[in-house]
Image (tube, rainbow, N blue to C red):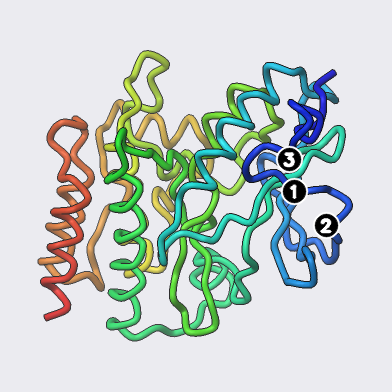
Amino acid sequence: VASTPAQVGGQRPQGWLAKEELTFGQVLGSGGFGSVYRGSYRGGEVAIKRLHPADGELTEPQLEEFRKEVANLSALSHPRLIRFVGAAFAPPSLCIVTEFMPNGSLYGLLHQKREPLALAERLSMSTQVAEGVEFLHGRSPPFVHRDLKSLNVVLDFALNVKLCDFGLTQSMEKTHITRRENECGSPRYMAPELFDSRGKITEKVDVWALGCLVLEVFLGRLPHSDCTSLPQVMDKTLVRRELPFNDREGVGMELWTLAELCLEFHPKRRIDVACFLEGLRGLAC
């Protein structure tokens, strides 16, 4: 069984919080890796993501993976990234604590609230998402989100967006944290190479997902909205080699062409996020 981070070397490592200082409130949702709560930490409102280990408890090597990840997350700060408060070990769960975003997710706005949005608002949100991805990819080495989707984009009261869950996917997979199949449709945003166990994961997987996200924002539909299962998405992507969106009704030609540069099937042919962001900003002129 893993020791708590506070016990390592007699000091609490960077980014780790005392679980006793966390208060859990309303459940905001459940996802592939656990549940998200509205809570508080030292009097401030926070979101707490409680991660459940698949085997009931974490081993020391598994916890060490999270220690490294938490240290990395503590060093990331940008207006388009959700603010990382810290992590806590509450056996058998790990908790990731971030700032609380009052307007929920971009997914909720587009597909549940279905609020009418002006084209300028859609373009602003798309540009802000790209700014967050550009910052991550500009790290050395590039920081790959790996799970970019509308559920992992959150909103403040003014509909400014921030990315969340960046950096956690890889360590969660390594530590066998429970992930439910078909949860919230992550395969809808997956680049072709991610369906291949031998495929190399680079920042270009985020570029594909970014193209999906931007078209989702403008079309109001999920990628591969004509598919209801993972095999259908795989067949459409790998066998028929069709794009996640089949028509561009409601999307201007300039934006559609820009998004298509993200959705090249070969990763090396995909545009990089800095060029994509420059193109989006050009559309705003």
Circle number at residue 234 = none
Calculate the distance from the C-alpha at mark 2 to the C-alpha at mark 1: 8 Å
Calculate the distance from the C-alpha at mark 3 to the C-alpha at mark 1: 15 Å
Task: Locate the C terminus and report the quarter of the image it occupies.
Answer: bottom left
Name the foreground residue: 243 vs 285.
285
Label 2: which secondary element: strand
Instruction: Name the kind of residue labelled 2 in the image.
Output: Leu
Could you tell me residue 55's position as x and y percent?
80, 21
Calculate the distance from the C-alpha at mark 2 to the C-alpha at mark 3: 15 Å
Task: Locate the N terminus and report the quarter of the image it occupies.
Answer: top right
For the residues bearing labels 2 and 3, Cβ distance under 8 angstroms:
no
Label 3: which secondary element: strand
Q: Which residue is mark 1?
A: 17
| Nearest to viewer (mark 2 / mark 1) | 1
The structure residue drawn at horizontal position 36% and vertical position 62%, both measured from the top left corner, is 129
Could you tell me residue 47's position as x and y percent?
70, 61
Instruction: Residue 128: name its quadrant.
Output: bottom left
Circle number at residue 22 = 2
The structure residue drawn at horizontal position 40% and vertical position 68%, both measured from the top left corner, is 220
For the residues bearing labels 2 and 1, Cβ distance under 8 angstroms:
yes
Instruction: Residue 94: name its quadrant.
Output: top right
Q: Is residue 68 left or right of residue 225?
A: right
Q: Which residue is mark 3?
A: 51
The structure residue drawn at horizontal position 62% and vertical position 65%, both measured from the top left corner, is 99
